[in-house]
Structure formats: C-alpha cells, structure tokens
Image (cartoon, rainbow, N blue to C red):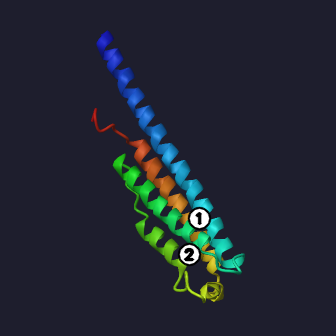
Amino acid sequence: MIAAGWYVVYRNSLKIEARKEAREFVDHLDGVIDSLHRSIIRYYCENEQHTGDLSSSIKAEFLLISHYLFLLKGLGINFTGGALLTNYRKAATGMFFETVEFKKQRDIPNWEAEVASLAAQLKLALRRAYFSWSGNYEHPKIG
C-alpha cells in the first residue's frame, strides 16, 4: 500500500514537472514572438540607415522560435501552426527584406495589421497546442 502511494506521488510529480517545463517554454516563446514583433516594426519604421543589426535580430528570433517548437515537440506537444509561422515570416520579411528597397514593405496595404494579426494567431495556436497537450498528458516514461 505504501509503495503504491509513493508510486502515485512520483508519477504526479513527474507530470507536474513536465507541465512546468513545457509552460516555461511556451511563456518564453510568447516573449520571443512579442520581441520579434517589436523588432519588425522598428526595422521598417525607425530604421532610416537600414542597419543590419535589426535584420540579424529578426532572423535570429525566427530561428529561436523554430528551436523552441522543436523542444516542445520533444515533450510531445503537437504544434499545428506551421503554416501560420510561415505566413508570419512572409509578412514580416516580404520580398524586400535586406535590400536597398526595404521600405517598400510599408507600401503593402495593411502590412502592420497583417503582422500583428499573424503574431496573435501564432501565440493563440501555441497556447491551444499546450492546453490540448496538458489536458491529456501522459509522461513518456510512465505511460
């Protein structure tokens, strides 16, 4: 009886720890998406000299999002927003990213609204994937 009780406690502690780790990844990813959105707006609106540090930062943040999604997949979280991420990258970088005509992105109708909308949709898809996973989570070691 005592061994069964300890097993239940151990199993629950593994679940809690895995959920906590996954939640931290999701929260960090939210922060990266927010930071990326601010960088994109600064890149097109406040970047008169077209400095490369902002474009490098934007590329790095997109790469960081991909890495976090890879880590979440390793935990068993099935993120189905790959198309959203692709569309967000397209809206953010456009055809003119890192060219001398980079300000032409602003000529695209409602590009700021499109970028903001896709960022919000990406965050929502991420939260949905997390909550779907946490509702029926089973630790891989204890099945």
Q: Is residue 62 above or below residue 106?
A: above
Name the residue: 30% across, 13% down.
3
Q: Which quarter of the rendered picture does the N terminus lie within?
A: top left
Q: Is residue 22 above or below residue 55?
A: above
Marks 2 and 1, how far apart at CA: 9 Å
Q: Nearer the viewer, residue 36 or 9?
A: 36
Name the residue: 57% across, 61% down.
33
Disc 2 marks a residue whose amino acid type is Ala
- Mark 2 crowd level (few <14, some 14–19, many ≥20, 10 Å Cα): many
Name the residue: 32% across, 20% down.
7
Disc 1 marks a residue whose amino acid type is Leu
Dot 2 falls on a residue whose secondary structure is helix
Q: Which residue is the site of mark 1? A: 36
Dot 1 falls on a residue whose secondary structure is helix
Q: Position of residue 117 (x, y in %)?
A: 60, 70
Q: Quadrant of residue 17?
A: top left
Whether pointer 2 and pointer 1 mark residues with C-beta atoms closer than 8 Å, the reply is yes
- Residue at the limit of the structure toward the top, as seen here: 2
Q: Position of residue 94 (x, y in %)?
A: 53, 82
The dot on residue 92 is 2
Q: Is residue 96 left or right of residue 1?
A: right
Q: Is residue 22 left or right of residue 76?
A: right
Q: Position of residue 2 (x, y in %)?
A: 32, 10
Name the residue: 42% across, 27% down.
13
The dot on residue 100 is none
Q: Which quarter of the rendered picture does the C terminus lie within?
A: top left
